[in-house]
Amino acid sequence: MKVLVTGGTGFVGSHSVKAIQDAGHEVRLLVRSPERIAPALDPLGVPAPEHVVGDVTDPESVRRAVEGCDAVLHAAAVFTYDARKNREMLDVNARATEAVLGTARDAGLDPIVHVSSYVALIPRAGRSTGTRPCRTRGRSTAAPRPRASGWRGASRARERPS
């Protein structure tokens, strides 16, 4: 099985790439910066997989990356502790998730998996102890879920802390 991984140079994504390759599957990455592949995967002992250069918010980039794949693991997301960039995070993460999941669905990929990090589980700012970051990243990766789960043929998502 060939699996497209977005966010494969991040923490969750790079460890997912290792697990997918260790299970005997091929991996293709969709990356903005190919020079980030080796620093992310070399420490894990993972050989650099095939990659497509593009942006997860660009439908054409996503279409090129999905072509020839059997499954997708979407782990890409913008993250920052800078509250001034909350709106950007919400916008970019929602658009990227809809582009990746929608394109994968239209191409007939199965399974289609969307993951995020523990940051998505941090309490809302109103409940924060003041030592935790704002929860915008969690809202930004969760925003497209209701639409995705309503797609015909979508199976119910299971959420587990990473």
Image (cartoon, rainbow, N blue to C red):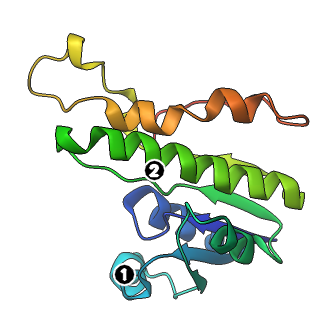
Mark with earlier residue (1, 2): 1
Residue at disc 2, secondary structure: helix
- The residue wearing badge 2 is 92
Label 2 CA crowd tier, 10 Å (few <14, some 14–19, many 20+): some
Q: Is residue 34 depicted above or below 161 in this figure?
A: below
The residue sitting at 58% across, 30% down in the picture is 159
x and y percentages locating residue 146 in the rendered image: 66, 26
Q: Three-letter amino acid code at disc 2? A: Val
Query: Relative to 103, is 97 above or below?
Result: above
Label number found at residue 44 = none
Question: Which residue is nearer to you in this view: 124 or 21?
Answer: 124
Would residue 140 appear left or right of 101 to someone viewing this image? left
Q: Residue at x 87, y 61 (%)?
A: 107
Q: Which mark is nearer the camera, 1 or 2?
A: 2
Left or right of 133, for residue 79: right
The residue tagged 1 is 36
Is residue 140 shown above or below 23?
above
Dividing the picture into quarters, in which one does residue 54 lie?
A: bottom right
Q: Nearer the viewer, residue 124 or 44?
A: 124
* Figure quadrant of residue 21: bottom right
Please provide percent x and percent y for residue 17: 56, 68
Residue at the farthest top position: 127
Question: Quick one: 19 or 74, which is closer to the camera?
Answer: 74
Q: Residue at x 33, y 39 (%)?
A: 87
